[in-house]
Image (cartoon, rainbow, N blue to C red):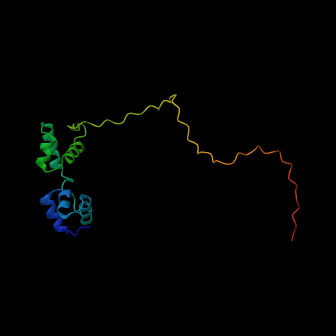
Amino acid sequence: MARISKNDLLKLQKKLHTDAKIGEEFGITRQAVHQLRKKYGIESRTAGNPERNKEMVELREGGKTVETIAKKFKLSIPQTYRILKENNPKKAPAKKTAAKKAPAKKAPAKKTAAKKAPAKKAPAKKTAAKKAPAKKAPAKKTAKKKK
């Protein structure tokens, strides 16, 4: 993990705003930055900001686009959608991208008349032609000798 002090992380958080951007600066992942924040007990800049969240909801209800709101507050678009949804549960914002439909329950597949091709059998070994075995006389029982 990168060696970033608590003070450095606080300064970078004010300057770069997101874990992803801080990670890019140090060549580490945003998840690693998140772990460092947890280790140092630093809240994310977007956590617990009710005034900002309320203002975001008001802007959205006023007709502003999610992209405009995201730029104003220097947040990602997905983060902005999440905040709007969490702070205004009665009216979730509509995304511009095509909404993913929940997968419909599939009906059980109908069995068709098509038959599977029979499994290929291993080729028989070529051996000398054998005659049908003659009936054998019952084997004689021999007593085993004890030593």
Residue 143 percent location from the top left of the image: 89, 61
Q: Is residue 8 above or below residue 101?
A: below
Image quadrant containing the N terminus = bottom left
Count the numbered circles shown: 0
Residue 72 percent location from the top left of the image: 10, 47
Q: Would you say residue 55 is visible in this rendering?
A: no
Residue 91 percent location from the top left of the image: 23, 36
In the image, 132 versus 97, the foreground residue is 132
**Picture quadrant where residue 26 is located:** bottom left
Q: Is residue 88 above or below residue 147?
A: above
For residue 81, side relative to residue 119 (left or right): left
Q: Would you say residue 54 is visible in this rendering?
A: yes
Q: Residue furthest top?
A: 113
In the image, 94 versus 101, the foreground residue is 101
**Picture quadrant where residue 88 is located:** top left
**Picture quadrant where residue 39 is located:** bottom left
At x 88%, y 59%, the residue is 142
At x 23%, y 42%, the residue is 85
Image quadrant containing the C terminus = bottom right
Q: Residue furthest front?
A: 128
In the image, 61 versus 138, the foreground residue is 138
For residue 89, side relative to residue 128 (left or right): left
Residue 79 percent location from the top left of the image: 21, 48
At x 56%, y 41%, the residue is 120
